[in-house]
Amino acid sequence: MATYWIDNFDIDGWRLDQAYQATQGGHNYWNEIRGAVETLTSERKARGEEWGTLGYMVGEDWGTADVINKGVYRDGGLLSAFDFEGKELISGPMQETGNAGLENGWADVVTVLSKPTARGYLNDEVIPNLFLSNHDGYRLADHFDPADPYYYEKLMGRHAILAAYSGPVTLYYGDEFGDDCRDAVGAQKDNIARTTGHLQPRDDRERELRAYVASVMKFRAANPAMWRGEVEFETVKDPKGGDILIVRKTDKESGNKVAVLFSETDAEVPVDGNTVTVKAWVPALVRIR
């Protein structure tokens, strides 16, 4: 079935719902499916085909790293599954709105941006897919209080974490301009994010959020260090109180190097010979080389 859609419709990516159901009877059937996909996409790439060559497959499994290790990742089955643990660390729980993540401050950013093995995953060959919200729960904006003076800035900050992640990421449509579910009446919390008809920014703040999200994702696309670079962390003291986290990422293949700065206050931060201006809760992204 997978090879049919690749050959006839040039499919490059697959989202595999309830992927754990293909690991039954002591066997991980994703081995055979992934093998068929990779064989065909390699052949198409060798022929010079533009599409139907990537063969990216991401599985849905709400389990912890340990559960996924023993399930879809086992025996080299899938290489990518949605990172529900990482999502909860940076943007709160799927189906509750009690917190907005980062309960441990910038330490949670360090956890999410670290290598997969540092987070308990099987090996560093797997590539968990990081996201902020999806169709099965509340939206990103629902985790924040609109009365917070940094409401939009904190939404920007979560998207910057996505942009700085080494591996695949998923954006849920509408999050980029702050769609929320607060006006959803009678909706079940396992599909509440699908209830609104809010398709475009409604005011200047929502347009500002969308512009920031676009800018950090363009920066990610232009700098391979953002999406595959090796990461280093440095924490410096903010004269106004608190800590500033500097995330440096280096891509060995291209030599590209970037820095992403996280701060709870407006600050001027020296980074590798440059002075970087960072606004409260709005990470600054800097190309070093």
Image: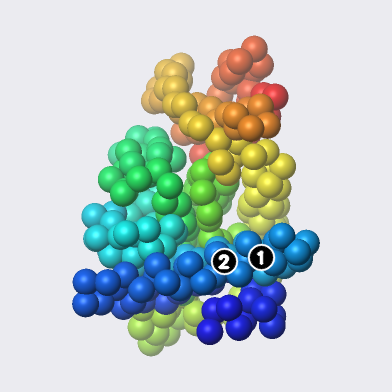
Q: Looking at the picture, which amino acid does disc 1 mark?
A: Glu
Element at badge 2?
Answer: helix
In this picture, residue 278 sits left or right of residue 19 = right
Viewer-closest of 90 and 53:
53
Extreme residue toward the top, this view: 273
Crowd around label 2: few <14 · some 14–19 · many ≥20 (10 Å)? few
- Residue, disc 2: 39
- Residue, disc 1: 43
Crowd around label 1: few <14 · some 14–19 · many ≥20 (10 Å)? few
Cβ–Cβ under 8 Å for marks 2 and 1: yes
Residue 242 coordinates in the image, percent (x, y) = 39, 25
Residue 130 coordinates in the image, percent (x, y) = 46, 55
**Residue at point 57% right, 66% down?**
39
Element at badge 1?
Answer: helix
Viewer-closest of 147 and 264:
264
**Is any atom of residue 68 visible in this view?**
no
- Relative to 198, is 96 above or below? above
